[in-house]
Image: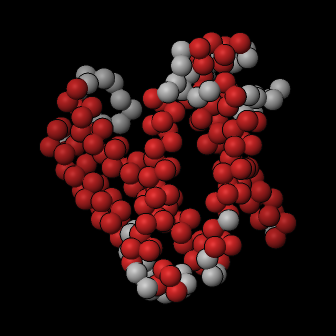
Amino acid sequence: MALMIVIGSLGGVNSWLVGPNKSLMATALHGDLPPILQRVNNKFVPTALLYLQGIVGSILALVYLLLPNVNAGYWYLTVITSQIYCVLYIMLFIAAIRLRYTQPNVQRPYKIPGGKLGMWFVSVVGLVATIFAFIIGFAPPTQISFGQIFESSTLAYVIPVASAMIVCCLVPLWAFKFRRPEWVSEARKLGLEED
């Protein structure tokens, strides 16, 4: 039973590693990532993106060396990830309302009942809950020791969390702003086709 749990966990880790990179590869096929990040192996696995993920993951793992215990490092990485997801969900709820007005006749697999009022209700409840979770994410927990520097000031806890979150949100915007039309042709030269 333990062996099957380990095999299942390895399979789960594999999908977590490759899944986001496959999504980024789809982005690369639209010309939003430079050709160096479009490299794939003979199975069309985005190897360059996996290497980049490994480098970024290794850099993030350094947080364990900078903090006094593993709990503090794990908390920082978890809260930064949660904050980024909160930003994503805030944008999704706003986009849902906007799309209901700008593209009301588009066929969708699921439509929130109640028309525009139903959409507003669901989106506002989601927005309020997500904004609340976002704000709570900046409150340092009292159960975890972050070291003397961080415990002396809430600002010392908030600045690293906010900085990491801002950097993670700005990277895709930066890549989108500086994309080039020739990046699409580079993807086509590799023989990649959009699904």
**Where, by quadrant of the figure, is residue 40 drawn?**
top right
Q: Is residue 113 above or below residue 131?
A: above
Quadrant occupied by the N terminus: bottom right
Q: Is residue 37 above or below residue 181?
A: below
Q: Nearer the viewer, residue 114 or 74?
A: 74
Q: Is residue 81 above or below residue 114?
A: below
Q: Is residue 12 visible?
A: no
**Where, by quadrant of the figure, is residue 147 drawn?**
bottom right
Q: Nearer the viewer, residue 116 or 102?
A: 102
Q: How is the image coloured?
A: secondary structure
Percent from the top left, x then y, of residue 161? 46, 64
Q: Residue at x 54, y 72 (%)?
A: 75
Q: Is residue 49 left or right of residue 81?
A: right
Percent from the top left, x then y, of residue 130? 33, 58
Q: Is residue 119 visible?
A: yes
Quadrant occupied by the C terminus: top right
Q: Is residue 137 left or right of residue 147?
A: left
Q: Is residue 2 above or below residue 179?
A: below
Q: In the orientation shown, which residue stands out farthest toward the left?
A: 117
Percent from the top left, x then y, of residue 83? 43, 59
Tally the numbered discs.
0
Percent from the top left, x then y, of residue 99? 27, 31
Q: Nearer the viewer, residue 31 or 126?
A: 31
**Where, by quadrant of the figure, is residue 137 drawn?**
bottom left
Q: Residue at x 81, y 29 (%)?
A: 41
Q: Nearer the viewer, residue 51 or 92?
A: 51
Q: Is residue 140 left or right of residue 29?
A: left
